[in-house]
Image: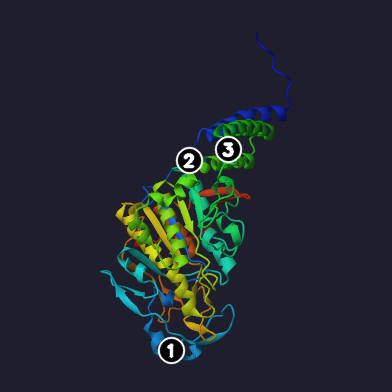
Amino acid sequence: MIHPLPNLSRRQLLTRAANGFGAMALSAFLGNQSSSAAPIPPQFAAKARNVIFLFMEGAVSQVDSFDYKPLLEVNHGKDPRKAIGKLEKTQFENIGTVMKSPWAFSQRGQSGLWMSDLFPNIASRADDLCILRSMTSGFPEHTSANYFLHSGLGLQGRPSMGAWVSYGLGSFNGNLPDFVVLNGGQIPSGGLDCFGSGFLPASHQGSLLNINGTPLANIAPGEKLPSQQDAKRRLAARLNQLSLEASGGEDALQSAIANAELAARMQAAIPELLDLSGESEATKRLYGMDADYVHTRTYARECIIGRRMVERGVRFIELTIPMVDGFQRWDAHGSLKSNHGNNARAVDQPIAALIADLKARGLLDTTLVVFAGEFGRTPFAQGSDGRDHNEYGFSIWMAGGGVKPGIAYGATDDWGYRAVENPLEIHDLHATMLHLLGMDHTKLTFRFGGRDIRLTDVHGRVIRDILV
């Protein structure tokens, strides 16, 4: 018997037609499939499959780490207005004298890269590093500069680069997020929006895991029996489907359901991921898990888990720095030697071990490691023993993932103050990272507010001279 179709309004017909698509999406989520879908196919073969972003919030001083400037020693204690010349306005306008680095520089490895004793362990990996010494930022203040570094815009609300990578490439692992932030103790200036998805679907936002204490709320099931949790999940699935049908397949609701289902799968995946009992004692010692300094142990745990995430297919992993005693971040407006010394003590050994471990496991070639802060610091003192913000020229480095090892690219002036040779913008960094992942930064777009928006906005060029 053929049942006649009910009399439906146009709105009812469109809503009911959409229900099938909502159910299809829901079934994909419940079938343990990733919610991510690449909007465009890769434009070319990718060199890198994963990114580990070592975020040095607060700004590492380039002239105390990766950019050797002998003139600072010769002119130490002199008036920078006379020695250097015209000075740009600084954040606090408390200009002291030219200040040499407290750390000695020397040439490292077969490559002969100049690096200081601030990072002795990272310096031992000099032949694996590609140092960019001509980076610039458009912002001299932490919050705006953090947004700029993460999203390509110095304002709140744009998708983070990790969210763009998740959106563009999809997932290797349906049980873990595509974009994970390992929090060692400090949420950066600008807050969680540094890791947000902005106008992209919410399923692409960064998932924050705490290294110390409980990694994630509700990571342990509250039900005593697995059967109880299964019953609740079946009920939730049914209620979610009804909600999708009522909404006509609302995107925000689909993302919320995707995130809830991923959270359920993470209850099984996260405890295994964070359990380091299977790591050898030699590996733990390599990273510094046995170090006397508690913050070294914290960052060592971050780096080991970052490597484990690469092995499990997480696309983009960001590591924040520990809350080093007495100092917030690398922001050395005073007490430069103590600030940078203690922060380096926390991260130096674990980072060097991460590079060595990835390389030994055959993962470095396909994992892009990026070490960066939001800007640099002045070659002259703030007050007597600090350094102010400097967005005009600073250093970052990359390793693995298709970049040339053991090279330096670009240069600042003789003072380490302004980028003068091959100056680079944050947009160039983003364009290059996407290129190494197989994406053309000009084609990875999302329609929002009446135009196609991309991570690099209308800027950015791939730094081809540093590519393998």
Disc 3 marks a residue whose amino acid type is: Lys
Give the residue displayed 36% in from the left and 52% down from the top.
366
Report the Cα–Cα distance between label 3 and label 1.
67 Å
Picture coordinates of residue 315, whole percent (x, y): 45, 49
* Amino acid bearing label 2: Gly
Residue 239 figure quarter: top right
Circle 1 sits in a helix, a strand or a loop, which is it?
A: loop
In-image side of 170 versus 254 (left or right): left
Residue 437 shows up from this direction: no
Residue identified by numbered label 2: 174
Contact check, label 3 and label 2, Cβ < 8 Å: no
The residue beneath circle 1 is 76
The residue at which mark 3 appears reads as 224
Tag 1: amino acid? His
Q: In which quarter of the image is the N terminus?
A: top right
Q: Is mark 2 on a helix, strand or loop?
A: loop
- Sequence-wise, the earlier of marks 3 and 1 is 1
Vertical side of 166 occupied by 7: above or below: above
Crowding at mark 1 (Cα within 10 Å: few <14, some 14-19, many 20+): some
Depth check, front residue: 344 or 230? 230
State how many labels appear: 3
Marker disc for residue 457: none
Circles 3 and 1: CB atoms closer than 8 Å: no
Q: How far apart are marks 1 and 2 (CA)?
A: 56 Å
Residue 345 shows in the view: yes
Front-most of 200 and 56?
A: 56
